[in-house]
Image (tube, rainbow, N blue to C red):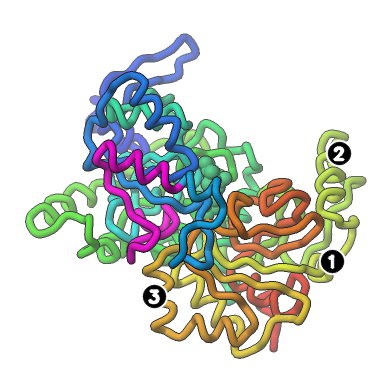
Amino acid sequence: MSPATSPQTLYDKLWTSHVVSEDRDEHGDTTALIYIDRQMLHEVSSPQGFEGLRMRGLPVRRAETQLAVADHAVPTRHRDQPIADPLAREQVALLERNTTATGLRYIPLTDGRHGIVHVIGPEQGFTLPGITLVCGDSHTSTHGAFGALAFGIGASEVECVLATQTLRQRRARNLRVRVSGTLPPGVTAKDVILAVIGRLGASGAVGHTLEFCGDTIEAMTMAERMTVCNMSIEAGARSGLIAPDERTYAWLEGRPMAPRGAQWEQALDYWRTLHSDAGAVFDRSIDLDANTLAPQVTWGTSPDQVLAIDGRVPDPATAPNDAAARKIARALDYMGLSAGTPLQDVAIDHVFIGSCTNSRIEDLRAAAAQLQGRRKAEHVKALVVPGSAQVARQAEAEGLDRLFTAAGFEWREPACSLCVAMNDDRLLPGERCASTSNRNFEGRQGVGARTHLVSPAMAAESAIAGHLADPRTER
Ligand SMILES: CC(C)[C@H](C(=O)O)[C@@H](O)C(=O)O
Ligand code: SF4
């Protein structure tokens, strides 16, 4: 069979169409120079790339393929004033200087298109099916929800893309994640991906690209698909993919940076070929039943330490081996939890609704719907941080900001915020947070802070209850 006629996976198609030159190493692995269509840049991982260019005296090869925005260090309050923290102020100023000096597009903090890099890329139609898209940021996998081959790269690779529009990459293996059935009420895309990570393990998908498929995925909105692909990296995969479909095209049509007119039609013809062929061979495959899925919550310090909300804190004594027992014991120690405690009895101090995982308008609507006019528990501090200015203005037009503030939540301006302790929003040692973000590592939300990853619905329900709570609970 010629390569053109053998069935291919979506990943194979995206890879093959971007190979500039390819080599096979002594282990039989394929390494290639691949063409990078687009790059996004933020203030934390781009300075080294720009500095490298300067040192070598190299120009940016195709400035029009780059898009920069500051999000990690940016405060979520007082945005009409200069940034108070000198380090953050300089990080943002440096990105401004670097993009001005090289003629790159930069979205300022005061711009109506500002937001978290992985929220605004799709929103602006910068993210498109069939392209390769990189960013010096691990959650670049988010953009795979549109059928783009999107992955995070290292700081030194940022320079390589700026200068050459190419990267050396090892070809990944194909792992299919098929999700079938109807998600029960109160169970969301976040629960699907947390359950998948629980199944695969935090490094279970290393060296693979995940392709999510099945009727549950097909029925998902683009926001839900982004939530799923966003966390592929937490199973060790650098990319997650979902084949584009009519919903994808409808979502993208008319976005500022998406193609128009004849070019749109041409693009559609190509995009419709972007799916795994019948008979395409996957190296591995797992199946998940959506019908029986319960809302998920992490109990430990790795996203794969996850259980259904009606479960109990695991006991190291029941671990399959010593190494696993030590891992559980260490996580429980950091998290301040005792084995056997029902997860729903775990009291929380904070709730965070935001991050590139769950800060789109659909996420805010889901959290608001769960509140149903109720108020957060007195001792809980709750924060809602929209993923972009567009999401914020849309939510305000729908009255969601007032609904949240009436429930005792703080309504902030878009940025990474409490997802990562790189800005003003952070927790104190020992404080516990139900968070819609994607990482529960030690210190992620502040030194000694404890993070439980949850869906927006569970975050809202937990804010009301004052402890981790099941969003399906009858009220
Ligand atoms: C700061 C940045 C490079 C980092 C990443 O790579 O993802 C951050 O966004 C994160 O979520 O941990
Ligand atoms: S919101 Fe969180 S996960 Fe997303 S890019 Fe920012 S820090 Fe990383």
Q: Say which element carries label 2.
A: helix
Q: For mark 2, what is the residue?
A: 326
Whether the magenta-drawn stretch holds residue 126 is answered as no
Question: Which residue type does callout 3 highlight?
Answer: Arg
Considering every residue shown, the one lying at the far top of the view is 26
The question of residue 116 being in magenta is answered with yes
Residue placed under numbered mark 1 in the picture: 342
Q: Nearer the viewer, residue 217 or 327?
A: 327
Q: Which residues are magenta?
A: 92-121
Identify the residue under disc 3.
393
Q: Is residue 14 left or right of residue 291?
A: left
Residue 310, position in %: x, y?
Answer: 76, 68
Does residue 436 appear to the left or right of 350 in the view shown? Answer: left
Which quarter of the rendered picture does the N terminus lie within? top left
Pointer 1 local density, CA inside 10 Å: few below 14, some 14–19, many at least 20: some
The amino acid sitting under disc 1 is: Pro
- Residue at x 35%, y 42% (from the top left corner): 97
Residue at (25, 33) in percent of width and height: 17
Mark 3, other Cα within 10 Å: few <14 / some 14–19 / many ≥20: some
User: Disc 3 vs disc 2: which is toward the camera?
Assistant: 3
Q: Secondary structure at mark 1?
A: loop
